[in-house]
Image (cartoon, grey):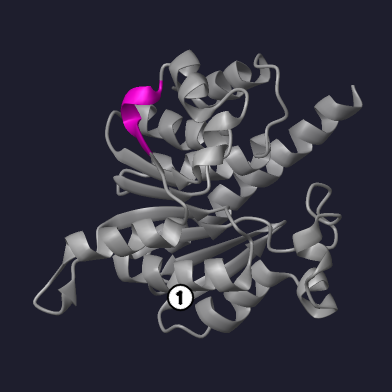
Amino acid sequence: MRFEGVAAGLANVEYRPLTSPAVGRLLYELALDPGTEEVLELGFANGTSTAYLAAALEEKGSGHLTTIDRPTALERHPNIEELLERLGLRAWVTPLVASSYNWTLMRLLEQRTADAATQPYIDLCFIDGAHSWETDGFAFLLVDRLLQPGGWIVFDDVRWTYAASPSLHGSPEVAAMPEEERVEQQVRKVVDLLVRTTPDYQVCLLGNLALAFKGEPDEPQFQNLPAIASAFLRESTHSLARAHN
């Protein structure tokens, strides 16, 4: 399914998507690459970003997406199953529910590890879940074991904080946090202190996203980044123009 088709389909659903068309365009372009076959998503919520990723797989006719979230995500309206069925993309996706996506990542590591060696297989991972140092810092370390050389990790909400979250800032859990935890951009700390300091990762900040490429800057996949970034920026401009019309 072409990007315009999935974007139009999502626009016809009555809900507030948590993934913008601009971010959806970037994910779509990365998943559309012929070398991207195994895709992993941590945090699916309603399934909006899932739909963009799955649409790219359907468009090229190959690939598979595994996406993980808590059981409460299925209580959303629409939920991921309803959204994917409506768009005709369900066959490309395996949704998993677990109390922690890190626990599921541990199971995936078990499946891919033998004789003290892990066989990586993931080509693209989108991390848009807990937004916390504890959860997503560990998630990066686990995903890194599963990510193939030449693969991408996309972190959403690098500027997000608990203090500024409309849905969480007033919760008892956030109120009980130390001030520095409430105001810290925790995903940004994961990117700066863990990803950038891991050998062979190239990091690019793009809006509220961080793109991490596992490889050298002269590799063809990384050389495609300007075109992918341009598509993201064009869609951002189009979305802004539509919002003002």
Magenta-drawn segment: 89-95
Relative height, residue 185 to residue 89 (above, below):
below
Residue furthest left in the image? 115
The spot of residue 47 in percent (x, y) is 53, 33
Along the line of sight, which residue is nearer the eye, 31 or 41? Answer: 41
- The residue singled out by tag 1 in the image is 201
Residue 214 found in image quarter: bottom left
Along the line of sight, which residue is nearer the eye, 113 or 58? Answer: 113
The spot of residue 64 in percent (x, y) is 30, 39
**Residue in the picture at 55% in, 27% down:** 79
Mark 1 surroundings: few (<14), some (14-19) or many (≥20) residues within 10 A: many
**Residue in the picture at 73% in, 40% down:** 236
Report whether residue 125 is seen. Answer: yes
**Residue in the picture at 52% in, 44% down:** 27
The spot of residue 38 in percent (x, y) is 30, 47
Q: Would you say residue 83 sits in the magenta stretch?
A: no
Quadrant containing the N terminus is top left
The spot of residue 78 in percent (x, y) is 59, 23
Viewed as shown, does residue 5 lie left or right of 177? left
Report whether residue 147 is seen. Answer: no
Quadrant containing the C terminus is top right
Total numbered circles: 1
